[in-house]
Image: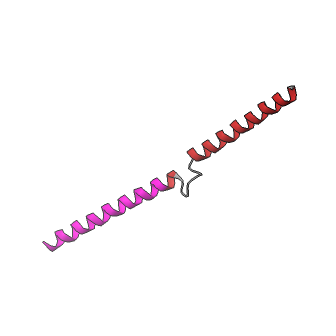
């Protein structure tokens, strides 16, 4: 009986350990195709590109006047 209880406790600990490891990996973005930091950088670069295109259009319009 003692061996069965020991086995159950050990199995429970292993399960908890694996669950925590999976959750940590998910929080760090390992479960997605792109890390959150990379996604943020790409979004920022897209915003800057749009702003620069807008400013270029404004400069061109000002030159025409």
Q: Main secondary structure of the magenta part?
A: helix
Answer left or right for 52 relative to 22: left
Q: Give me the residue at 45% from left, 53% from top.
A: 40
Q: Give me the residue at 31% from left, 63% from top.
A: 52
| Residue 62 screen position, x and y as percent | 17, 68
The colour scheme applied to this rendered structure is secondary structure
Point out the residue furthest to the front here.
1
Point out the residue furthest to the left here.
65
Q: Give me the residue at 55% from left, 58% from top.
A: 33
Residue 54 sits inside the magenta stretch? yes
Q: Give me the residue at 15% from left, 74% from top.
A: 64
Q: Is residue 34 positioned above or below 59 on the image?
A: above
Q: Is residue 27 positioned above or below 4 on the image?
A: below
30 vs 1, nearest the viewer: 1
Q: Is residue 28 positioned above or below 41 on the image?
A: above
In the picture, the quarter occupied by the N terminus is top right
The stretch in magenta equals 39-65
Residue 62 sits inside the magenta stretch? yes
Image quarter for residue 2? top right
């Amino acid at each position: 009986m003692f061996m069965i209880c020991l086995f159950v406790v050990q199995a429970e600990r292993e399960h908890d350990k694996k669950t925590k490891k999976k959750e940590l990996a998910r929080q760090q973005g390992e479960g997605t195709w792109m890390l959150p930091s990379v996604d943020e950088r790409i979004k920022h670069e897209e915003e800057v590109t749009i702003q620069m295109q807008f400013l270029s259009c404004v400069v061109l319009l000002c030159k025409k006047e």
